[in-house]
Amino acid sequence: MSRKRRSFTTKYKVEAARRVIDSGRTIAEVARELGINEGLLGRWVADERRRIEAAATSGDQPLTAAERTELARLRRQVSEQEKDIAFFKKASAYFAANQQE
């Protein structure tokens, strides 16, 4: 029987890598805690460190943990508001069509 291959979102990968980078804990500790392979987490950490380094060389500052949390909250809020707007557009079109009858 074959095992289903697990896939991880980019957000999950970044958050896992930031656990290692921000906390100063070893990759092995965090990998055990998350139940993933050390090599996999090591690649994610290396990718995140390269991203941070690239941001630093271009003059940008990487986001702090608080800023990342706020950004995620705002993205969720925007998504919810876009859904509300789409609903209200459909509702207004429905009522406009029924009003003319």
Image (cartoon, rainbow, N blue to C red):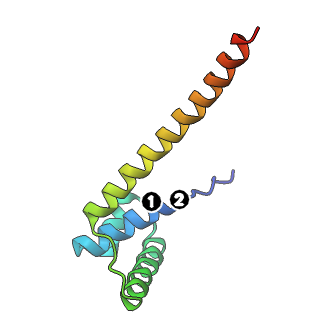
Considering every residue shown, the one lying at the far bottom of the view is 57
| Residue 74 picture location, percent across and down | 38, 51
Quarter-wise, where is residue 52 in the image? bottom left
Q: Nearer the viewer, residue 42 or 59?
A: 59
Q: Is residue 69 left or right of residue 84?
A: left
Q: Nearer the viewer, residue 85 or 48?
A: 85
Q: Element under label 1?
A: helix
- Residue shown at 46%/74% (left/top)? 44
- Density class for disc 1 (Cα within 10 Å; few <14, some 14-19, many ≥20) is few
Q: Quadrant of the C terminus?
A: top right
- Residue 8: which disc? 2
Relative to 68, is 91 above or below? above
- Density class for disc 2 (Cα within 10 Å; few <14, some 14-19, many ≥20) is few
Q: Nearer the viewer, residue 30 or 84?
A: 84
Relative to 57, is 16 above or below? above
| Residue 77 picture location, percent across and down | 41, 44
- Residue shown at 44%/80% (left/top)? 51
| CB under 8 Å between discs 1 and 2 | yes
Q: Is residue 79 left or right of residue 66?
A: right
- Residue 12: which disc? 1
- Residue 80: which disc? none
| Residue 92 picture location, percent across and down | 62, 23
- Residue shown at 62%/57% (left/top)? 5
Question: What whole-number distance in Å separates the C-alpha atoms at marks 1 and 2?
Answer: 6 Å
Q: Amino acid at mark 2?
A: Phe
Considering every residue shown, the one lying at the far top of the view is 101
Relative to 68, is 39 above or below? below
Q: Amino acid at mark 1?
A: Tyr
